[in-house]
Amino acid sequence: MSAYDDLMAFQRDTEALAQVAGRLSWDQETMMPRGAADQRSDERAAMEAILHQRRTDPRIGDWLAAIAEENLDPVARAQLRHIRRSHDRSVRVPERLASEIARMVSRSHVIWAEARADDDFAAFAPALKEVIALRQEEGAALAAGGDVYDALLDDYEPGAKAADLEAMFGALRPRLVALREAVLAKPAPQGLSGAFDEAGQMKLARLLAKTFGYDMRRGRVDKAVHPFSSGSGDDVRITTRTMPLEPFNCFYSTIHEVGHGSYEQNIDPRYRLTPLGAGVSMGVHESQSRIYENQLGRSRAFTGWLYGQMRDTFGDIGIADEDGFYAAVNKVRNGYIRTEADELQYNLHVLLRFDLERALISGDLQVDDLETAWNDRFLADFGFAVDKPSDGVLQDVHWSAGLFGYFPTYSLGNVYAGCLYKALRDAVPGLDGQLAQGDTSGATDWLRDNLQQHGGLYTPREVIEKASGAAPSEAPLLDYLEEKFSAIYGL
């Protein structure tokens, strides 16, 4: 065997073990007995230690040095790009630190869940301090004298810099705020009425998953406190949640996670259990979940079909026609929760978290001051006060899981989705007619062929440019939002 063959055989086992580690996390969120938390943290730490040993194995450097890349095809060179990057980053992080981060975030997640249920930030603060200290140590090791936050961000969006994202988000904010103010000055559309039983919500959620192309033979839909997607290839799992008076939360969380799951399921099977066999970045991943959820799932055409499905499932829902239902789905209203936010205000929630977590990692903001800082910023951005920690600083799972650098990829994904949707509309002229029949295949096939199948073959920016035909820009997203909400609210 050649050095390349030896390296890829070794990497395949590493990728397989990483999938097993991911399954431990999925189980912890969905089915693990509550009393198993301490044991699970040890299990995850042990698995992370094994993975770190493999990612830092000296043979990787030897194999990379022995491979003549000029003799390889573009796919093989892309594989090496990912392996080299992973190896270079992994060798900077001591095994002890990698293992301790895995152990701590497993414990921290359980503490966060209990603190959230009790609306007690003080109960979570000590664990959060430990998580931040560990991630600061990791970021410093990775940065090697550079920006610590950028080093953490690179885990989720390779090549991205916080300063560049700050400039992009700064361009988003003025037009978003102006549009929000104009919309909120108008009368709000009528909402749903009645209660929506869990069985009916889950039945319709699974129908929506299939409607958007999620392959249930290689996936499943479960419930979790915080909806998420995990896995790749032939084992891709998603979760959703139900609320008796808020069925849209269930339905659009499901469509959102299906966007993530379908991306993983649609990657070229030749890349399975290789570095190319997963989504290339969280920003690109989020572009798929957001375009499924918003540009497609909340469109006038698709909501017309969904209106019929809801009436068939629940009977009278308090809305007389499809136009009223479309307005209800896209209702702009004040709210605390990021995952429940309308398209117009969602990015403002993300920008708040982006700024706060940068300050936490830099040391400019201390954990003991975080709740106050959150509440002050929320009041300034949204114009009303946070009522309780579970609606504020405790609402998201990310910091308990140590995912510092993740939040900005949500807004970056929205920007990417705006670029992709503009190209999709041009490429599929009959899209609205298809969506009105509950047929998403024109859109999802285009996304599969132009983006999803490539997995990690290209860099994040390259794959967006190839699919959309232009460099990423916030302009298509802003134009889409202004056109959509101006029509709904008669601006």
Image (tube, helix red, strand yellow):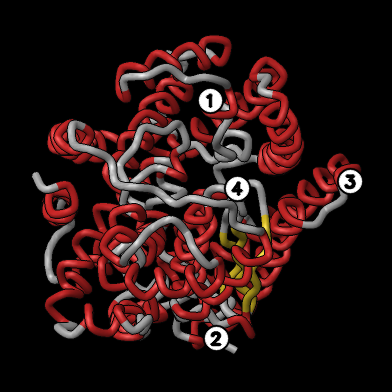
Residue at position x 63%, y 21% in the image: 129
Q: Are marks 1 and 2 in contact (CB under 8 Å)?
A: no
State the SS at label 2.
Answer: loop
Q: Amino acid at mark 3?
A: Ala
Secondary element at tag 4:
loop
Tell me: residue 240, above or below residue 81.
Answer: above
Hey, what amino acid is under mark 4? His
Q: Is residue 230 left or right of residue 419?
A: right
Residue at point 31% right, 34% down? 348
Horizontal side of 182 relative to 117 (left or right) equals left
Q: Where is residue 353 shown, x and y percent of the image?
A: 41, 31
Query: Depth check: 124 or 385 in front?
Result: 385
- Secondary structure of the residue carrying numbered label 1: loop
Q: Residue at x 30, y 23 (%)?
A: 381
Q: Which residue is mark 1?
A: 393
- Name the side, left or right, on which 1 lies relative to 25: left
* Amino acid found under the numbered disc labelled 2: Ser
Percent coordinates x, y for residue 89 in the rendering:
50, 49
Residue at 54%, 71% in the rendered image: 63
Question: Pointer 4 and pointer 3: residues touching (CB < 8 Å)?
Answer: no
Q: Mark on residue 2?
A: 2
User: Circle 3 sits in a helix, a strand or a loop, which is it?
Assistant: helix
Give the residue at mark 3: 36
Q: Position of residue 236 (x, y in %)?
A: 60, 72
Sooner in the amino-acid sequence: mark 1 or mark 3: 3
* Foreground: disc 1 or disc 2: 1
How much space separates mark 4 and mark 3, taking CA atoms?
Answer: 19 Å
Alpha-carbon distance for marks 1 and 2?
52 Å
Q: Is residue 123 left or right of residue 441?
A: right
Residue 226: mark in rendering: 4
Where is the N terminus found, in terms of image quarters?
bottom right
